[in-house]
Image: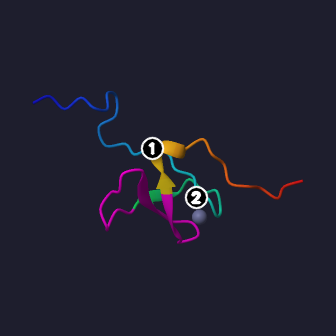
Amino acid sequence: MNMEAHPGSSATPPTVTCPYCRSTNTELFSLFGQQLLTEQYYCNNCRTPFEYIKDDVHVIPERTNT
Ligand SMILES: [Zn+2]
C-alpha cells in the first residue's frame, strides 16, 4: 500500500491561525479524535483550544475593525 496522500509533506501540519489572537503558534489537539470536518487545535499563545474547520478555511469570522 502506497501512502502518498500528502505529497511534499510528511509530518508538517498546516498553518492554523488562532481565531482569538490570530497567532500561528498553534498545534493539533485531537485528544477526542478527529471529526469529519473539524479538528481540535490548541493555541500556544493565548492557551485556548479551538476548532479548526477543515472544509471552511476561507471563512473569516466577523471583524469589528473599522
Ligand atoms: Zn490564540
SS class, disc 2: loop
Name which residue lies at 29% across and 62% down.
Answer: 33
Please identify the residue farthest to the front as the structure is shown: 36
Q: Is residue 48 above or below residue 16?
A: below
Front-most of 6 and 38? 38
Label 2: how many residues lie within 10 Å, few (<14), some (14-19) or many (20+)? many
Residue 15 is covered by the magenta coloring:
no
Instruction: Give how far across and how far down residue 14 sits, in percent.
Output: 45, 43
Instruction: Give how far across and how far down residue 12 sits, in percent.
Output: 37, 42
Secondary structure mostly seen in the magenta stretch:
loop
Relative to 55, is 33 on the left or the right?
left
Please identify the residue farthest to the bottom as the structure is shown: 47
Name which residue lies at 77% across and 56% down.
Answer: 63
Name which residue lies at 36% across and 51% down.
Answer: 36
Q: Amino acid at mark 2?
A: Cys
Residue range (magenta): 29-51
Label 1: how many residues lie within 10 Å, few (<14), some (14-19) or many (20+)? few
Residue 63, label in figure: none
Q: Which residue is mark 2?
A: 18
Front-most of 18 and 57? 57
Instruction: Give how far across and how far down residue 62 sits, in percent.
Output: 74, 55
Q: Amino acid at mark 1?
A: Pro
Please identify the residue farthest to the right as the structure is shown: 66
Q: Which residue is mark 1?
A: 14
- Ligand 1 image-quadrant field: bottom right
Question: How many angstroms separate mark 1 from mark 2 (CA)?
Answer: 12 Å
Instruction: Give how far across and how far down residue 29 sits, in percent.
Output: 38, 63
Relative to 47, is 13 on the left or the right?
left
Which of the 4 image quadrants contains residue 6?
Answer: top left
Name which residue lies at 63% across and 45% down.
Answer: 59
Q: Is mark 2 within 8 Å of ligand 1?
A: yes
